[in-house]
Image (cartoon, rainbow, N blue to C red):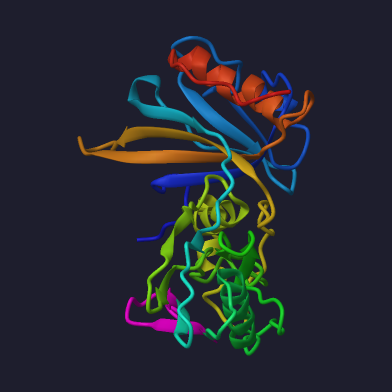
Amino acid sequence: MGLAGINQSRQMYVGQATDAATEIADLANANDIVVLAADGSEASAGDDIAVFVKDSLGNVTSSGAIKNDQIIDVRVIPFEAKTLKAYEISGLTVDVNSLYSVNITISEHGSLSSEDEYVKKGFYQAKSGDTDLLVLQGLAANLNANFSKEVGANASANPYFSFVVSGTAGSAKLTITEKNDWLVNYDPNKKTRHQLKFTVDFVATTYPTVGVSQAQSAGKGTGYQIQEMEFYLLGARGDSYREGGYPHNITGPKLVSTVDGEYNVVEISYWNEGRDEAKKSKQAITLAFLDDDTADGSNADVNTSVIAPLVTALGVTLADLDVA
C-alpha cells in the first residue's frame, strides 16, 4: 500500500506562520502555514478545521478537513536543545608505580547493532612525586593521542570527545564530554545516530569517583529530528517514490528544514472513519516552526495564526510560545 497521499497516518508541514492570518489569501509566501476552518474561513468555536500551506511553487494545499468532534489531542512542544553526555573522574588517589587506565566504550559503533563496540583507552604510569592533577593530565594526553588516529583528529583534539582537566593538586578532576563535531554531511535518507552511545570506566589500584556529570538528552525540535521527520513524512508530495527509478531519479523540492534549525512543534491528533465501514484510524499532523522569540519573530505569528485558531475552534487550553 502506498504511503503517499493526504490520507497517510501522519502529515508533516515545516514552514512559518503568518501574522493574523484569517483566510487563505493571507498565505503570501512559500511555506506559509495557517489553521483555518475547513472551508477556508476564519475558525470559530465548534468549526471543523484544516491546515493550509503554500508550497514553494505558489500552490495552496490543505490537510483535508479535520472534524471537530474527532480531535483526540492537541499539544504545543517548545524547542529544547539537546544536551551532551559528560562523565567526571575525581577523588583520585595516587598509588606510586600503579598503572591507571580510563576506558571509553562506544556501543553500536559502525552500525546500530548492540554487538558492535569500540573501546578507546588512555594509560598513565604513576611515579614518585605525581599528584592527582598530573595523573589526570597524563590520562587526558594519552586519550588524545589514542583518538588522534581517528578521522578529523589530531594530537590535541578530536571530533568525538573533549578531555578537560580542572582543579588543583589534591582536588583535580577529569571531565569527558561527548561532541557532535563528527556529525557532518548529514543525510536524512540514512539512519544516522545524532549522539554517541558510550560509557566511561576506570582501572586503578584505588578506584576514584566516576560518574555521569551531565545526562544525555536528544532534545525536542532539533534540526536533525525535524529534517528526519520531514523526509519520511512528505506524504502527498510523493517523494517516497522519487528514488525508485535509479539512475533516472526525480529530483523533488528541497527539504524546508535544516540541521542547524531550532523548531517549535504543534501536534494535532485525530481519528478518521472509513466511508463504507465503521473502522476508525488514528491520524496526526505535525507542524514545525523555527523558534524565534523576538517581538516580531515566528513565535508571535504561531501564537496568532496557529495556536489561537486551535484554541478558538476546539475549546482546548494551549500555552503560547514565549515571546520577548
Tell me: residue 27, above or below residue 100. Answer: above
Tell me: residue 132, above or below residue 248. Answer: above
Quadrant where the C terminus is found in the figure: top right
Quadrant where the N terminus is found in the figure: bottom left
In the rendered view, does 186 fall on the left or right side of 217? right
Q: Residue furthest top?
A: 45
Give the x, y percent position of residue 267: 47, 35
Answer whether residue 110 is magenta in the image: yes
In the rendered view, does 223 fall on the left or right side of 312? right
Which residue corresponds to the image point at 55% horizontal and 52% vertical from the top-left? 83
Q: Total number of numbered labels?
A: 0
Tell me: residue 45, above or below residue 310. Answer: above
Which residue corresponds to the image point at 50% horizontal and 61% vertical from the top-left? 88
Q: Residue furthest front?
A: 129
| The magenta segment | 104-124
Q: Nearer the viewer, residue 249 or 121?
A: 121
Which residue corresponds to the image point at 46% horizontal and 70% vertical from the top-left? 93
